[in-house]
Amino acid sequence: KQEVTQIPAALSVPEGENLVLNCSFTDSAIYNLQWFRQDPGKGLTSLLLIQSSQREQTSGRLNASLDKSSGRSTLYIAASQPGDSATYLCAVCNNAGNMLTFGGGTRLMVKP
Amino acid sequence: NAGVTQTPKFQVLKTGQSMTLQCAQDMNHEYMSWYRQDPGMGLRLIHYSVGAGITDQGEVPNGYNVSRSTTEDFPLRLLSAAPSQTSVYFCASSYQGRAKNIQYFGAGTRLSVL
């Protein structure tokens, strides 16, 4: 059974810092990995999707990397802003492409 | 463009009552799914559908039923609510009948079972 772990569970940083969120998974037979953002009381918004054959994906100040063989992904946020405060979740898609398994999320607070 | 719409936003039930959580999408997505989110546990897949007339179980299907009679709608039924079903429920959809594509989520239904 696939298990996805995110460390740390919570993170507080001053504005302007670069930061890294971690995601690990136990079964490397994945189709892709997705990073999501969740604001309090809201649904999830997709940030980045990395195919299993890719090493990284970038969108603006966000960069996600994937090391499938070691079961790890990182989300790098450059020059953090208070508006980045949210919970970030990673999810891996199984090889059949029909199910996602989520991590518990990292709750990020960026202080002005 | 409405995207994925979930109703109701909030619901309180008594143990043993039944109800249906509604989910509708207007993007002509073939893949739809239901998750529950509990504190510290991330999201867990309840049921999913890869197209009209096709449904399958996810990680935590017990106590829940689904059907998919149209592409647009994917309701989740609780036949006899239990306190363990207190949670936030999210519906999601994606293109081409696969979870591997970008997922679009609804705003959620917060359910309390007393």
Image: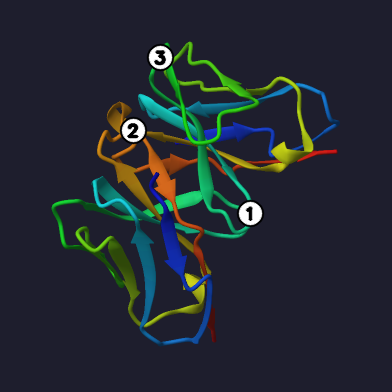
In the rendered image, residue B63, in percent from the top left (x then y), is placed at 65, 26
Point out which mark residue A98 bears: 2
Residue ID for mark 3? B52
Taking the spot 81% from the left edge, 23% from the top edge, the residue there is: B17
Residue ID for mark 1? A41
Neighbor class of circle 3 (other Cα within 10 Å; few <14, some 14-19, many 20+) is some
Amino acid type at mark 3? Ala
In the rendered image, residue A14, in percent from the top left (x then y), is placed at 50, 88
In the rendered image, residue B66, in percent from the top left (x then y), is placed at 55, 20
Q: Which chain carries label 3?
A: B
Quarter of the picture holding the N terminus of chain A: top left
Amino acid type at mark 1? Gly
Task: For marks 3 and 2, give the one nearer the viewer.
Answer: 2
Point out which mark residue B92 bears: none
Is residue B28 visible from the viewing direction of this image?
no
Q: Which chain carries label 2?
A: A
Observer-nearest of A8 and A36: A8
In the rendered image, residue A52, in percent from the top left (x then y), is placed at 19, 51
Q: Taking A111 as reference, is B85 left or right?
A: right
Rendering quarter of residue A109: bottom right
Q: Which chain carries label 1?
A: A
Label 2 sits on a secondary structure element that is: loop
User: Residues at badges 3 and 1 in contact (C-beta under 8 Å)?
Assistant: no
